[in-house]
Amino acid sequence: MVDARALSQTRRGASASALGTAGRLWRYKWIQRGVVWGIIVVAWQTFGLIRGPFYFPTFTDTILGFVRLVVEGDLIVMAASLQQLLVGFALAVVIGIPVGLILGGSRSGEAVLGHYINAWYVTSKEALLPLMIILLGVGFEYRVGIVFAFSALYVIVNVATGMRDVSPSLIETARSFGASRRQVIVKIALPSVVPFMFAGIRLGYGFAIKGMVIAELWVLGGTGGLLADLALQRELDRYFAIALIIALVGVAGSSIIRTLERHITPWGAGAMRTTERRAV
Amino acid sequence: MEERDARPAAPPYIQVHGITKRFPAALKGQALVTVLDQVETSIARGEFVVLIGPSGCGKSTLLRIMNGLIPADEGRVTIDGATVQGPAGDRGMVFQSFNLFPWRTALQNVAFGLELHGVGSQERDGRARRLLAAMGLGGFENYYPRQLSGGMQQRVGLARALAIDPEILFMDEPFGSLDAQTKLLMQDELETIVQRHKRTVVFVTHDMEEAVFLADRILIMSQRPAKIIEEVRVDLPRPRMDHMRAAPEFGELKAHIWNQVRTAQEFRPTIGAVDHPTAATHG
């Protein structure tokens, strides 16, 4: 009896310290992510094995699919799509920001542009696909155009919201120091728009990817065409690999945008979260 | 008590002539609300004047009209004989909600006014640095406003207004949103600053004690449509010290002002007016 109790106590002690070690490790964000990843991969593998490759490829199939993409040169097709994505998205940002500034910052800008932007906002962007094909064909220009049509709007609308949202009391403060109208725009309105601009850029990037895939699915070319072919031929391993690459491009792009945002707006919520120090 | 004889004889520096201001009513179709009604007053150079009155009586509106931030409907304000047309670079303003620019560090906030007027970056940074150090904020130059406490933010706000070396400092309930202790400390600090660089200060508050502690003269305003109903001269010696808050004259002045403000407020009874009739006798 005594021995058994002593044994169970030591065992409890050991398991408590093991829990303690696990608890300490769990604090690391990469350990947390790793564990969740592990669970997902195991579940994925199991589900794939049960359903069979005709319906759902396993994790290992998908990895092999990725190798096949590399070997068979499909990555070149994807690189072309990425190029269209980047060109269309860059245009959306470069054109979207000034349009947003005009739309949100001036009464006449709102009066002239407001209706069109609103119409664009409420209309399905997909409805533009046939028109864009008529205007631009099915090649590079068309795809860039669709990416632009999908993403520019979010940049414009967010920047315009930021312009309308500039704090009247900060404007008053600047005026109390004798700021001219020009100085109010440059030193107050523009810096307060920057966080909104980044929100628009991040949102717009997600829609740019959506635009890229839809544009290509519609004309069965590029990465979208590849996806359609692979699905019809039930080559789901490569299909999944492509889907994963697209997701990675999305995540990588948005974290680049986030990092940029932290550097450009060190006062913002995103940058402060990790370094928040409130002096007392 | 020291008698400061130079001041009463000084010529008016800021003159307020028949200022009337009306605002559109909150509801459509109602008549305009008259906030200020033919306000007359004058302020001498170097004087510390406090505007006090029931809440919502238009103290802040009068302050903004004096600074030129908003136009009056009738009347005019002159400073040193010239009619105020709009805000100018030699008048500083401190706000109740600090209004620091969130994207600027403490240093950049303080340098703002100098930057507007084209002062070179070395000179303005030097001056901003010295002012922050004088405010006890040395070492916080590169902090953003949201990293600072309320009291520190308002010290930055005060430094920002002082950086342009203003002739007049307009202060709109600058300590109204600070906690009680910080508020007292800031009042001491402001007294020190005012003593060091003689400035004309127009200060809005609804805090009786703050008014008596800081003012040379207190202008009591009535409920809307507001007029100045009484002027109270505060003859406590300068520099004002914390222990004076306990002096009998201090308490008497405070009680008198509260009496006036309460009477003004009772024209339109509110919860505040019947809340603590004895509040003035408390510290």
Image (tube, coloured by chain):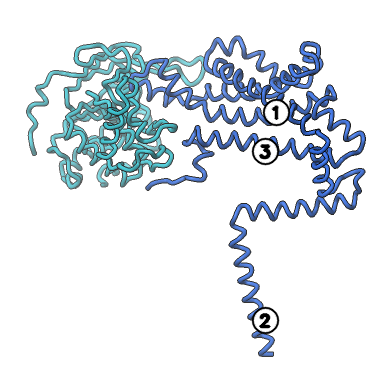
Instruction: Please tell me whether mark 2 sits on a helix, a strand or a loop.
Output: helix
A140 left or right of A264 in image: right
Return the residue nearer the eye: A12 or A115: A12
* Residue under pointer 2: A8
Are the residues under marks 1 and 2 on the same chain?
yes
Q: Give me the C-alpha separation between circle 3 and circle 2.
A: 48 Å
Which mark is in front, 3 or 2? 3
The chain in blue: A
Instruction: Please tell me whether mark 3 sits on a helix, a strand or a loop.
Output: helix
- N-terminal label among 1 and 3: 1
Badge 1 sits on which subunit? A
Q: Give me the C-alpha separation between circle 1 and circle 2.
A: 58 Å
Q: In the rendered image, is residue A42 in sight? A: yes
A207 left or right of B54 in image: right
Task: Give the residue type that dot 2 points to.
Answer: Ser
Asked if A132 appears above or below A8 in the picture, the reply is: above
Asked if A140 appears above or below B254 in the picture, the reply is: above
* Residue under pointer 1: A207
The chain in cyan: B
The circle on residue A251 is 3
How crowded pointer 2 is (Cα within 10 Å; few <14, some 14-19, many 20+) is rated as few
The location of residue A170, given as percent across then percent down, is 42, 26
Residue in view at x 13 percent, y 37 percent: B238
